[in-house]
Structures are given as structure tokens and as C-alpha cells.
Amino acid sequence: MSVVSAAVFGVHLIFAALWSGTVLFTTYAVLPTALNGDASPGPLAAITRKLKLVSRASALLLLLTGGHLAATYYTAETLTGSGPGHLVITMLVLWFVLAGLVEVAASKLSDGFEEQKLREPAREARPFLLGASLVAILLLLDAGALLGLY
């Protein structure tokens, strides 16, 4: 593996872990806090802005680094005709789903927190955050399966 590929792979892994961890933390810690009314909307709005920032930055960096890695290590035939290729395609689909779920959830939280509401936006965002958490876990499992093939 070249130094460039190693660096790209490292950035890819770091931002994949950061994105997944941020989504899981928001679902595990922030969402219950809002549902219980144990915080005020101001700090939770700031956390939601960070979730959006991490999600958008990670999505962009993962697209760029993943595209580089796919172009370096796969052909159209190996992407569509091999086990590792199928895992890469699955990862791409899950990546789009995760980005969409996080955007919807963060939007629902932000809109409600700006109106100084707490429990209602958390209830509205809950299914999207739970779905995003499931997708984040599936992405990590997919990446583990892909790495296990090498």
C-alpha cells in the first residue's frame, strides 16, 4: 500500500468512526436527555449543530476518500461481481441512507429547539435517530467484513 493510499485509508476510517460515534452518542445520550426534559434547548441546539457539522463533513470526506480507494482497488467488474465489491456497494448505499436520516433528525431537533421546545422535537426525531444508529452499526459491520476479506 502506498503512503497516499494509507493516508487516505486512515482519514476514511477516522471520519467513519467519528460519524458513527456522533450518531450513536446523540441517540444514546442527547435524545433521552431531551425526551426527559433534563436540559434546556440552547445547549441541545449547539450539540445538534455539531451533529450536522460532523455528519456533513464526514459524508463529504467519506465520499472523496472512498471514491479514491474504490478507484484504486476496484474495477467496474470487481465492484459488481465480487464479494468485496458488493460490500463496497452496500457501504455506499448505507452511507446515503445514514446521511439522509441524520439530516432529517437534526432538522427536526434544530427546528424544535429554536422554538424553545424540547420533548416534542426529540419525539419527532427519535425514529430517525434510531434508524441512523442502526445504519451506523451496519456500516461498521460492513467495514469489518470488508477488512476481514483482506
Image: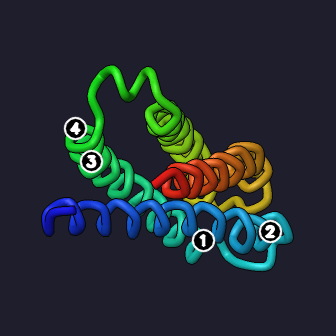
| Residue sitting at the far front | 150
Q: Residue at x 59, y 41 (%)?
A: 101
Q: Are marks 3 and 4 in contact (CB under 8 Å)?
A: yes
Write the residue at 55% across / 67% down. 22
The CA distance from mark 4 to mark 2 is: 41 Å
Task: Name the element at disc 4.
Answer: helix
Q: Which residue is mark 4?
A: 71
Q: Nearer the viewer, residue 74 or 14?
A: 74
User: In this figure, which residue is indicated by the disc labeled 3?
Assistant: 69
Give the residue type that dot 2 points to: Pro
Which quadrant holds the N terminus?
Answer: bottom left
Q: Secondary structure at mark 3?
A: helix
Task: Give the side of residue 87 with respect to residue 132, left or right.
Answer: left
Residue 83 higher or lower than 121, as above or below? above
Left or right relative to 123: residue 79 = left
Q: Which residue is mark 2?
A: 32
Depth check, front residue: 78 or 56: 78
Q: Which residue in the structure is indicated by mark 1? A: 44
**Residue 17 in sight in this render:** yes
Could you tell me the amino acid type at mark 4? Ala
Residue type at tag 1 = Leu
